[in-house]
Amino acid sequence: MILNVTDLIKKKTNEMSFDLELDISKLQRDDFVVELADKLKIKGTAILDGEDILLKGTIKTKIKSFCSRCLAPVDYPLTIDFEEKYSKKQGEDIYMITEDRINLEDMIIDNIILSYPAKILCSDDCKGLCPVCGKNLNEGQCECLKDVIDPRLEALKQFFKGD
Ligand SMILES: [Zn+2]
Ligand SMILES: [Zn+2]
């Protein structure tokens, strides 16, 4: 995941566009692992900013995840716009330029972590799992719900009768 920025460093140009397609199955850093269900596409523009380089663009991929309600596997599409600074000098929120190259991996992982959805659903109307028997309710109703609700309804009927 290396972007060659020699032309910018040597000031042959002020701006260069890039369009990369990475055929990788996962991204990993320390405890963070994300499996990819599609190629990772990253495109944008690298702009010379004094001695630094400003990188603007879009990351597009699909991540392998699970439905928060029914746990079914979901390939979740991610489109992330980014704007980051790269420099030969270290600093806060700055990525490093090493030689004439930029390693995109850290920046990509940071951006995926930042925009990772808190909740992923297989569909907006996912019915989830039965809390009693664990059956996937998208595949059909189980018997538990009746058993839980019926006695309560019965008690309610008795209550209204007595009123
Ligand atoms: Zn679901
Ligand atoms: Zn059930």
Image (cartoon, rainbow, N blue to C red):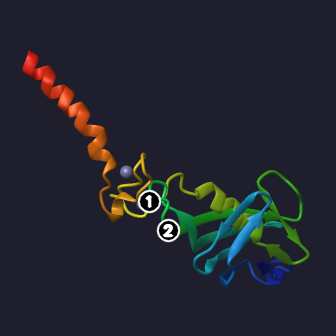
- At label 1, the amino acid type is Leu
Residue 153: x percent and y percent?
20, 33
Which quadrant of the figure contains the N terminus?
A: bottom right
- At label 2, the amino acid type is Val
Splitting the image into 4 quarters, where does residue 109 fall? bottom right
Residue at 80% in and 59% down: 30
Find out whether the residues at labels 2 and 1 contact each other: C-beta distance under 8 Å. Answer: yes
Splitting the image into 4 quarters, where does residue 22 fall? bottom right
Query: Taking 112 as reference, is 37 above or below it?
Result: below
Residue 151: x percent and y percent?
25, 33
Splitting the image into 4 quarters, where does residue 124 fall? bottom left
What residue did someone put label 2 on? 74
Residue at 39% in and 50% down: 130
Residue at 8% in and 21% down: 161
User: Is label 2 within 8 A of ligand 1 (CB to nearest ligand atom)?
Assistant: yes
**Near-viewer residue (46 or 129):** 129
Quarter of image, ligand 1: bottom left
Does residue 12 appear to the left or right of 140 in the view shown? right
What residue did someone put label 1 on? 121
Does residue 31 appear to the left or right of 138 in the view shown? right
Does residue 157 appear to the left or right of 91 in the view shown? left
